[in-house]
Image (cartoon, rainbow, N blue to C red):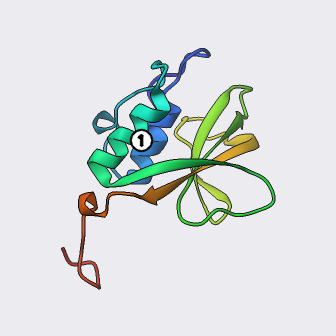
Amino acid sequence: QTIFDAVKGNCLQASLASALEVSLDTVPDLAERDDWYEALNTWLRETYGVEVVCVPAGGWTPPGIPLTGGMGARGLEHVVVCKGGAMIHDPHPKNGGLSEEKEHWLFVAVEPANLPLCAPGGEP
């Protein structure tokens, strides 16, 4: 995360970069757009063959490596990367995580032709 303003940060952009294992500058910062969710899914679909589906948190552990959004430890909306119900990456350098989980953003394959494929064993 490189923007720490109380009004606008880039934790979503940074969490996406971490979950996708790419550099921050390759992920668009769409937070200020009115259509950010649609624009994000268009970019994800065209670039990686996936979209994110937002589902309410609470009472279950999402599969895979979802983004989890909610109230951050600093009292602001925040997004982190999780796995197995636990935070594995907080893009904010203070690493405070979330004080309350509100939603999970699950990656769902929608354009398999855009997915980078490999043979069993991980070889491209």
**x 67%, y 29%: residue:** 77
**Quick one: which residue is furthest to the bottom in this view?**
120
**In the picture, residue 26 is in which quadrant?**
top left
Residue at the spot 70% in from the left edge and 64% down from the top edge: 61
Q: Where is residue 45 shown, x and y percent of the image?
A: 34, 48
As drawn, 30 above or below 81: above
Q: Nearer the viewer, residue 90 or 69?
A: 69
Q: Position of residue 70 (x, y in %)?
A: 70, 38
Instruction: Tell me the SS state at disc 1.
Output: helix
Residue 32 spot, x, y in % from top left? 47, 18
Q: Which amino acid type corresponds to the residue marked 1 in the rendered image?
A: Asn
Locate the C terminus by quadrant: bottom left
Q: Is residue 35 above or below residue 124?
A: above
Rendering quarter of residue 120? bottom left
Residue 97, x across and y down, in percent? 67, 42
Q: Residue at x 39, y 44 (%)?
A: 17
Mark 1 packing: few (<14 Cα in 10 Å), some, or many (20+)?
some
* Residue 9 shown left or right of residue 46 in the figure: right
36 versus 118 height, above or below: above
Question: Label 1, on which residue?
Answer: 41
Q: Could you tell whether 3 is left or right of 42 in the image?
A: right
Report the residue at 24% width, 75% height from top.
118
Please name whichever residue, 30 or 14, is drawn nearer the observer in this view of the structure.
Answer: 30
